Amino acid sequence: MLGLSFELSEEQEDIKRAVREFCEKEFDPELALELDRKEEFPMELYKKAAKLGFTSMRFPEEYGGQGYGILEDCIVIEEMCRADSSLGIAITAATFASDLIVLHGTEEQKEKYIPPICRGDFISSGAFTEPARGSDLASRLDTRAVRYGDTWYINGVKTFITNAPVANFFVVLCQTDPKAHPPHRGQSLFIVDRETEGVEVSKLKDKMGIRPSLTGEIAFSDAKVPADALLGELNRGFYYAIEFFDKSRVGVAAQAVGIAQGAFEIAYKYAKEREAFGRPIIQFEGVSFKLVDAITLIEAARLLTYKAAWLIDQGKPDPLIASMAKTLASEIAVRITEWCIGILGGYGYFGDYRVERYHRDAIVTTIYEGTNEIQRLTTLRYLLRRL
């Protein structure tokens, strides 16, 4: 990999090499283009990656995971997104929101859902966003859960839900106390199986990017779930969700770093080989300076991302650093992939050279897990507390 390296341990370097070898062997560029056009999830690749433990790095060993931390998970995410932005995101995001079960689930819930996730038999999904709410989880949710006896009845709609069309279960944030003030004190999480009566999933089509990572809408119409589907304590769901996002957005930063690195390497190789006016275009300052700036920004974003991940693994998660990492990494990914398209010129505008897809895929990292405007507000809030 071009650029300076964070001082990884020997074991972490082995993980990086293993993931790179897997991607070089299994990530077919033609398949990636086909899945992008068809908006299909790479199920076979996901199962292969899961079998090797790449999708369960951060899950406990007692449930079939690898027992590593968020930093090792970020190494996997970065390497896969470097190899292919679309396939990398689709595969590494397939376990989204399962962490909430590990953190807050009962033993029965963990035994039921986490081993199949680690084996690659299950895909998970987190249903938080609503059509009228967006990133504002603190307001009163339109999705309600009401209890009658030993059964909860869920009604409402969740939209822009990652993995919804292929997920086996959903972790759903619901309003359980409509009179709570402020409203977020009356929200709870539930684990809802896909086959639950009253659950209808529709696929959202024609996305700009990350098209093999499927997105959908979930409608709940008197969906009945048992009392033991409640995840964690009643009316603590908002706090669990915020805690989760403070960690998961570090994974988004790793996606962005990998995307930027992958696009950079394509452009760097092209600039050394492509000639204009009798010499390689890398000898022109208009090209070389962009490449130098790109690798500098990538290294800065990588180090900030690794720091955010390391802090989580040390039991000292820092929302300030996590938000800064996500903001910086996602925005430099968009900028660098655009530069790379320009370096490739007309070729960069076509799918065969991949950088246009890296650019399309980079844009979503500025949006999901909380838009970058939300990240800046989070950063400001913590700055005001500390300075």
Image (tube, helix red, strand yellow):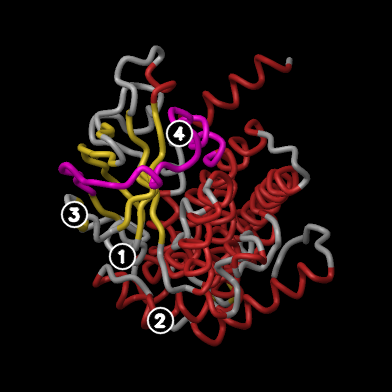
Kindly report the distance in space between the C-alpha atoms of the residues bearing marks 2 and 3: 28 Å
- Amino acid beneath label 4: Gly
Does the magenta portion include 303? no
From the image, tell me which residue sits under label 4. 237
Kindly report the distance in space between the C-alpha atoms of the residues bearing marks 2 and 1: 13 Å
Is the C terminus in the top left, top right, bottom left or bottom right quadrant?
top right
Does the magenta portion include 223? yes
Kindly report the distance in space between the C-alpha atoms of the residues bearing marks 3 and 4: 23 Å
Give left or right: position of 79 versus 348: right
Sooner in the amino-acid sequence: mark 2 or mark 1: 2
Kindly report the distance in space between the C-alpha atoms of the residues bearing marks 3 and 1: 17 Å
Is the N terminus in the top left, top right, bottom left or bottom right quadrant?
bottom right
- 188 w.r.t. 73: above or below: above
Give left or right: position of 172 versus 57: left
Which stretch did the figure color magenta? 218-245
Q: Is label 3 in a helix, a strand or a loop?
A: loop
From the image, tell me which residue sits under label 3. 197
Sooner in the amino-acid sequence: mark 2 or mark 3: 2
